[in-house]
Image (cartoon, grey):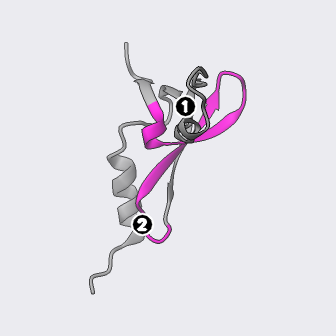
Amino acid sequence: MEFYDEEEVIKELIARSPYSVGDFVKCYYDMSDYYLFPDDERTYYYGVITHVHTYSFPWPKALYYRVICTDGKERYFLMHEIHERHAKDAQ
């Protein structure tokens, strides 16, 4: 059985992330697809990523992002729930 250094795996996940702290993003909750009626519109949230997190049950395998949205609320999104990115360093 091969063991891994969990801290190194987390660093690698964050390094490979297409999003970083300071990026302005457009997001929506993916689970809402299950609860929307055909005529309902998806709610989009816009905001700035303030922190990149990992969850590690049972091992590190995914990232989620803390976003301060334009309505002033803090929300959390998985990587696939972020649909547009405006990099902090874009001109």
Residue 18 percent across, percent down from the top left: 35, 37
Q: Is residue 66 magenta?
A: yes
Residue 59 percent across, percent down from the top left: 43, 69
- Asked if marks 2 and 1 touch (Cβ < 8 Å), the reply is no
Check the image and report above or below for 51 versus 23: below
- Give the foreground label among 2 and 1: 1
Q: Which of the 4 image quadrants contains residue 71? A: top right
Which part of the image, by quadrant, shows the C terminus? top left
- Looking at the rendered structure, which numbered label has been put on residue 87? none
Q: Which of the 4 image quadrants contains residue 51? A: top right
Q: Is residue 17 left or right of residue 66?
A: left
Which amino acid type is shown beneath numbered disc 2? Glu
Residue 6 percent across, percent down from the top left: 41, 70
Check the image and report above or below for 14 versus 41: below
Q: Quickly name the residue at label 2.
A: 7
Q: Is residue 70 magenta?
A: yes
Check the image and report above or below for 53 versus 68: below
Callout 1: helix, strand or loop? loop
Q: Residue furthest left?
A: 2
Which amino acid type is shown beneath numbered disc 1? Tyr
Check the image and report above or below for 18 versus 5: above
Q: Quickly name the residue at label 1.
A: 28
Q: Residue at x 72, y 26 (%)?
A: 72
Q: Residue at x 56, y 42 (%)?
A: 31
Q: Is residue 31 left or right of residue 69?
A: left
Other-residue count near label 1 (Cα within 10 Å), few / some / many at <14 / 14–19 / ≥20: some
Q: How many marks?
A: 2
Q: Is residue 48 left or right of residue 2?
A: right
Residues in magenta? Answer: 57-82
Of 81 and 40, which appears nearest the observer?
40
Of 71 and 32, which appears nearest the observer?
32
